[in-house]
Image (spheres, rainbow, N blue to C red):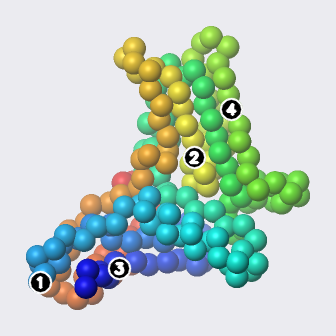
Amino acid sequence: PNASFIPFVFYPKGKERAHKLFYISKSRDSSRKKNISLSPNLLKKFFEAFTEDANVKEKFRTLKVTVLPSSSALEKVLSLDFIRRLDLVIYAPNPDSPNLRAQMKQRMENMNVEKIEESYISDGGSIEPDTTLRAEAEVAAENGQVISYGRVQGRTVKRSTSDIPMARRVQVDTSSPQAERYALQQFKYNERD
């Protein structure tokens, strides 16, 4: 009786969108006077449970689910006043990923590695990520997570890209039955959120 339809679009192929699912996380069903919502982390748990199915494991071996972070998430994680420690967790990127992601995927396959965990610990000064570390952090943000530990205005903080999901606010006319689906199809992944 309380089931709801959540509009979504899944892109199995494509340069930037490959293997990505976009959905309407919050909407209002005015006919039933009901708010409908589904958090990114709850959806992630659903897909993680799905990937544990024996048939799925047999066919795909290892599938990892990452909630895409906001386009500003990595900067927020790296913008602490003082970074004491920086952790990168990287799962193998999709096989058709561009550039560094494809190289990293191939390298991980060659070494029979499912996950990379790197920790950078300061020598007393604040960690200053170089271009190589930033590039690896971009891969980690989309295929795992980046976590920074340090201080902001004297307070000890921990920030993670997994806590800052991508979200776009879009207003649609819900009187049209296809309005939400149309909004999803017009979504541009590389736009700033």
Separation of disc 1 and disc 2 at Cα? 39 Å
Which residue ends up furthest to the right in the rendered image?
110
The disc label shown at residue 119, or none: 4
Mark 2–mark 3 Cα distance, whole angstroms, equals 26 Å
Q: Amino acid at mark 2?
A: Gln
Which of discs 3 and 1 lies nearer the camera? The answer is 1
Q: Earlier in the sequence, mark 2 or mark 4?
A: 4
CA separation, marks 3 and 4?
38 Å
- Quarter-wise, where is residue 169 in the image? bottom left
Kind of residue sitting beneath label 1 = Ser
Earlier residue among tags 3 and 4: 3
Looking at the rendered structure, the secondary structure element under dot 3 is loop
Q: Residue at x 23, y 88 (%)?
A: 177
Label 3 is placed on what type of residue?
Pro
* Element under disc 2: strand
Query: What distance separates the C-alpha of mark 1 from that of mark 4?
Result: 51 Å
